[in-house]
Image (tube, rainbow, N blue to C red):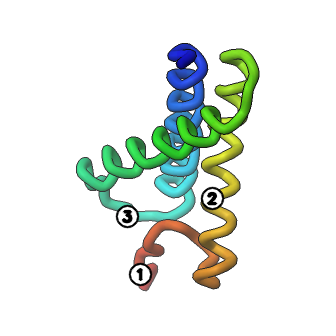
């Protein structure tokens, strides 16, 4: 088992999760920060990146990119199936 590839995939997934979270935080006003939700989503994003990177054979840089893109792919599939514009809860803006 090639651990650097798995670690790079996990890191790519976590970066994707962090980018999505930051985008959500700055897209809406009065968004609260829930530490447990954040940590859970970061872990899940990392696991998705790890699983996608494990499915491909390549180097650590490729695994990082695939890990990032794998999280993006899963998020978009979820939004299509659930028919929701966002993965996150949209706060009431009234």
Characterize the local packing of mark 3: few (<14), some (14-19) or many (20 or more) Cα atoms within 10 angstroms. few
Residue 92 shows which numbered tag? 1
As rendered, which of 47 and 55 lies closer to the eye?
55
Characterize the local packing of mark 1: few (<14), some (14-19) or many (20 or more) Cα atoms within 10 angstroms. few
In the image: residue 39, left or right of residue 70: left
Residue 64 shows which numbered tag? none
Name the outermost residue toward the front: 1
The image quadrant of residue 31 is bottom left
Q: Position of residue 60 (x, y in %)?
A: 66, 17
**Secondary structure found at label 1:** loop
The image quadrant of residue 74 is bottom right
Residue shown at 53% from the left, 46% from the top = 48
Residue 74 shows which numbered tag? 2
Q: Position of residue 17 (x, y in %)?
A: 52, 45
**Secondary structure found at label 3:** loop
Q: Quadrant of the C terminus?
A: bottom left
Q: CA distance from mark 2 to mark 1?
A: 26 Å
Q: Earlier in the sequence, mark 2 or mark 1?
A: 2
* Residue linked to disc 3: 30
Q: Position of residue 20 (x, y in %)?
A: 56, 50
Residue shown at 54% from the left, 25% from the top = 6
Mark 2 in CB contact with mark 3 (< 8 angstroms): no
Q: CA distance from mark 1 to mark 3?
A: 9 Å
**Secondary structure found at label 2:** helix
As rendered, which of 57 and 45 lies closer to the eye?
57
Indicate whether 83 appears above or below 79: below
Q: Nearer the viewer, mark 2 or mark 3?
A: 2
Q: Earlier in the sequence, mark 1 or mark 3?
A: 3
């Amino acid at each position: 088992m090639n651990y650097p590839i798995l670690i790079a995939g996990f890191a790519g997934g976590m970066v994707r999760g962090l980018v999505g979270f930051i985008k959500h935080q700055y897209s809406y006003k009065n968004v609260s920060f829930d530490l447990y939700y954040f940590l859970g989503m970061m872990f899940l994003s990392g696991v998705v990146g790890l699983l996608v990177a494990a499915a491909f054979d390549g180097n650590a840089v490729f695994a990082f990119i695939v890990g990032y893109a794998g999280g993006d792919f899963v998020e978009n599939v979820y939004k299509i199936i659930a028919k929701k514009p966002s993965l996150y809860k949209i706060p009431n803006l009234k």
